[in-house]
Image (cartoon, helix red, strand yellow):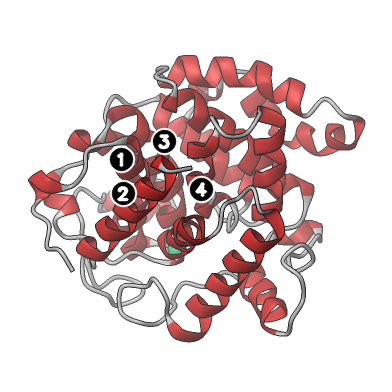
Amino acid sequence: MRVYSMQTIPDNDLSAGILGVIVGDALGLPVQFEEREERDIKPVTEMIGYGVFNVPSGSWSDDSSLTLCLVDALTKVSPHQRQQFLQQLGQNFCQWLDNGYLTPFGYAYDVGGATYKAVSRLQKGVSPLESGSKKEYDNGNGSLMRILPLAYYYQQFSPEELINLTHEVGSITHGHLRANIACGIYITIAVQLLQGKSPHQAYTDSLKQINTLYSKPIYQQELAYYHRILAGNIQDRSRDEIKSTGYVVDTLEASLWCLLTTNNYEEAVLKAGNLEKNTDTVGAVTGGLAGIYYGLKNIPEHWLSQIQKLDEIIDLMGLWDSVMQTT
Ligand SMILES: [Mg+2]
């Protein structure tokens, strides 16, 4: 294994987005589940350790593990080979839950309820196309938090194909249309950022595309749950109007709000970490977009250097980059 210094981390969009997720997750993890009043009294300003899961600073959770499981699957099977790819991803999720695959300390922690149920079904041989719950109650943010790697495939798939892939990958754990649409909106915005647009431009331009991609009648009822995002002015909401729970609609709203009301990576993920409750996931979802836009150099070095197993993450990113270059 190669040991990286901060200066030798490949400075590209892949590293910026994925490390953006991981740093945002690690920053918010120690204060997960806490109330906003606690954050107002004692705000998160730095990467800290030994919070709710009693793990050292720089520890990342299920958000990052499952994102890396997706990256790992993408290095092994082309997403164009849909069945085999979904099978590989399902196997990775089982390995994560059973054996702590792609975790900081060799065991899975911070496992969400819907994800646990879905992976348990995969372990029993249920198809990845059928494993995720389609119940309305199971619309947590567990698919949204791990979906970002698919955005990097926008040149290989049409927008419609990318949305279909996004829905299928999301559905492995979260099969309801509402969670699917959250992933679709997020990926659409991430693609705009990858194309070099500012957060505000990416948000505005995505709305037109989202309305087209989700114009079929089957989507209309569920798309309505995103009306505050689709209105095009989520950034104008006050902090009191932004919830940061594990509900997928809240998480997407909060993350876009954090991105659109700040001016650099650090500000964006600190704003996420100082909301409430699901701070690791809002940090991860915000951090992915902020990482892509502001770039690796804008992620504070003293945060990156604390990330657990950074060398292994960078190796996996390098492998993914080389696989993408050859396909
Ligand atoms: Mg987590």
Q: CA distance from mark 4 to mark 1?
A: 24 Å
Q: Which mark is residue 289?
A: 3
Q: Which type of secondary structure does the marked residue at label 4 adopt?
A: loop
CA gap, disc 2 to disc 1?
Answer: 5 Å
User: Please, what secondary structure does the residue beneath circle 2 have?
Assistant: helix
Say whether disc 4 or disc 2 marks the residue closer to the N-terminus. Answer: 2
> To which quarter of the image does residue 125 belong?
bottom right
Tag shown at residue 19: 2
Label drawn at residue 16: 1
Instruction: Name the amino acid type tagged 1.
Output: Ala
Circle 4 or circle 1, nearest the eye: 1
For marks 4 and 3, give the CA distance.
17 Å
Q: Disc 4 marks which amino acid?
A: Ser
Residue in view at x 51 percent, y 79 percent:
95
| Residue 154 in the image, given as x and y percentages of width and height | 55, 32
Q: Position of residue 215 (x, y in %)?
A: 82, 25
Residue 38 vs 55, above or below: the answer is: above
Which residue appears at 70% of the width and 36% of the height? 161
Asked if labels 1 and 2 touch by Cβ distance under 8 angstroms, the answer is yes
Label 4: which residue?
244
Looking at the image, is mark 3 or mark 2 earlier in the sequence? Answer: 2
Nearer mark to the viewer, of 3 and 1: 1
